[in-house]
Image (spheres, grey):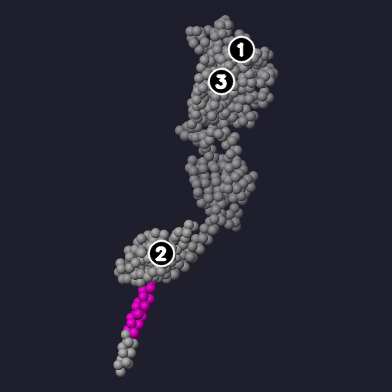
Amino acid sequence: MLITRKVVEGVLERGEVVPFFQPLRELRSGRLLGFELLARWQHPELGSILPHSFIETIERSGLLAELTRQVLSKALRASADLPDPLRLAVNISPSQLKDPGLCCLIADTAAEMNFSVRRLSIEITETALVDDFESARKNLGSVKELGCRLLLDDFGTGYSNLRHLQKLGFNGLKIDRSFVSDVLHSRDSRKIVAAIVGLGQSLNLTTIAEGIECEEQASLMLYLGCDVGQGWHYGRPTPAAKIGEVVHAPQPKLSAKWSVAGNDQHLASLEASPTQRVAHLQAIYDGAPVGLCLLSRDLRYLNLNQHFAEINKTSASDMIGQTVESVFPRWFPLYEPYLKRALAGEALSGLEVTRPGLVPGDVDQTILISYSPARDEAGEVIGISMALVDITLRKQDETALRSSEERFRTLIDRNPQTPWIFDRDGNVLDVGVQWERLTGYTRETTLASGYLETIYAADRERVVSYVRDAIAHKTDMDIEWRVVLKSGETCWVRSRGSAVFDEAGEVYRYYGSTEDIDELVRLRRYKAQFERTRTVSLGVAQLQARLS
Ligand code: C2E
Ligand code: MG
Ligand code: MG
């Protein structure tokens, strides 16, 4: 269909151009913030016709002001019941910024419809600023004075001077749909979006992502720091009659997941914007009791905390921007294999590395190191996060403890008695090496209840009930019994032990020792026999004396 001036005049006369409403939602929460008004020509036969087919002709015909008036007044009439915080955004073409009547048009239409101008946003494209900056500045200044918000539409496709953004008092940037549509596939688009968001944040502007068509794009745009989303994912442009449904629809939930080049990524927190994440990270850096640093792919120090500088005995200013190799040539060969693995995507934690002193003559340092690949939103490794803990002192303590344990064990092993430990159920937890020397049974066969097998059958019940009673009454142990040696012979032993109690006063362990008293028992027997013989012979002697 050929759209001529005559055609558009007729369209506007009959009021066939109407506003459609497309929702804008806060990305983080899904909360509805308002609608953008998009002109639709409702053709009696052809149905809804999109603006690109008729706007240019209307513009050339000098009828844009009339189009804006009709779209705006119909939209405001339909929005009479729209809850107050919800805003409406109206599109203004670049040429309209030269029209001195623009401000009055907006103010009068809003007043006529009894709609607060403070709830209106004006969207203009970057081209408007390039064409005739002076007129644009004047007109936009008046519109701002009215109380409208200013949004820069399709940002990233034009050539606007960044200083204009500040000078003209914009409130928000709408990131062009072309970047959003391939944000999941194009690294360049992601970097452009991140740069626009960074620009917006530093100028304190709201960033709005246009053309979000799926949840993954929404999650990624949120991750990149965008505030607001608009697009088919949140709703197609709808006629006025349907805006009530949108207002009352449940808020869409964000699962905060996306996949780039087959890598699944997740948002750790829906609350944090990149700026907040950076602030959070810095707080962790400053407060962490470990040394932390971030290395670039070419192994330069990008960021580090005070602990890291202290552990490395080197000031932060001597490290930042420098390569690991140039700052620590003595240590680099130790780190290099791990750094290469981390760059290849492997996370390595808890590596104990003993490194020589920073300069010859310094003592060795033992360091616990973790390397994690740092990834961007596409899962690409963009650097290495390194964590260090200096465990030199702990290592020295451990070595001292180990050698004192070894000394202690030597002393114990040289003791002729067999040390042992019982638990509160009468199980052997440990037994000295002397046991094997004495009986021929290994430690393993004796542990737990294994020792019961070594008790001479006639003594077993007595020993078992003695041990049970001692534990029950929390008394010391002192018992003699016979052990059946591996050789088959029996041998008298004496076991003595004392209880150690836990905090509740219950028996926790018995510590004691067992000694070989076979010789002693034999002597005792011999003595007893001797005594008996002596008594008998004394008796015989006395009897003899009495009889003689
Ligand atoms: P715009 O202001 O950038 O509007 C966004 C355009 O993106 C709209 O196209 C909208 O329908 C489309 N869109 C929104 N979400 C998605 C999505 O998820 N996927 C895709 N593929 N497209 C999406 P529309 O309605 O055809 O409008 C085109 C342009 O016409 C607008 O671009 C705006 O510059 C202009 N326009 C619309 N209404 C008016 C108006 O009343 N006055 C003036 N001067 N210009 C208008
Ligand atoms: Mg727009
Ligand atoms: Mg746009």
Spatial CA distance of label 1 from label 2 is 101 Å
Q: Are marks 1 and 3 in contact (CB under 8 Å)?
A: no
Q: Nearer the viewer, residue 198 or 119?
A: 119
Compared to residue 178, the image places residue 398 above or below, namely below
Of callouts 3 and 2, the N-terminal one: 3
Please rate how many residues cluster around mark 3, counting C-alpha atoms within 10 Å: few if below 14, some from 14 to 19, many from 20: many
Residue type at mark 3 is Phe
Query: What type of secondary structure mainly makes up the magenta span?
Result: helix
Which of pointers 1 and 3 lies earlier in the amino acid sequence? 3
Near mark 2 (Cα within 10 A), the count class, few <14, some 14-19 or many ≥20, is some
Q: Is residue 390 magenta?
A: no
Q: Residue at x 59, y 27 (%)?
A: 207
Q: Position of residue 23 (x, y in %)?
A: 54, 21
Task: Tell me the quarter of the picture where residue 223 sits.
Answer: top right
Of labels 1 and 2, earlier in sequence is 1
In which quadrant of the rendered image does the C terminus lie?
Answer: bottom left
As drawn, the label of residue 470 is 2
Q: Report, in whole angstroms, how far the alpha carbon at label 1 lies from the one at label 3.
A: 17 Å
The residue under label 3 is 35
Q: Which residues are magenta?
A: 516-535
* Callout 3: SS: strand
The residue singled out by tag 1 in the image is 69
- Foreground: 272 or 385? 272
Q: Is residue 516 left or right of residue 398?
A: left
Residue nearest the observer in this picture, 105 or 41: 105
Q: Nearer the viewer, mark 1 or mark 2?
A: 2
Q: Amino acid at mark 1?
A: Arg
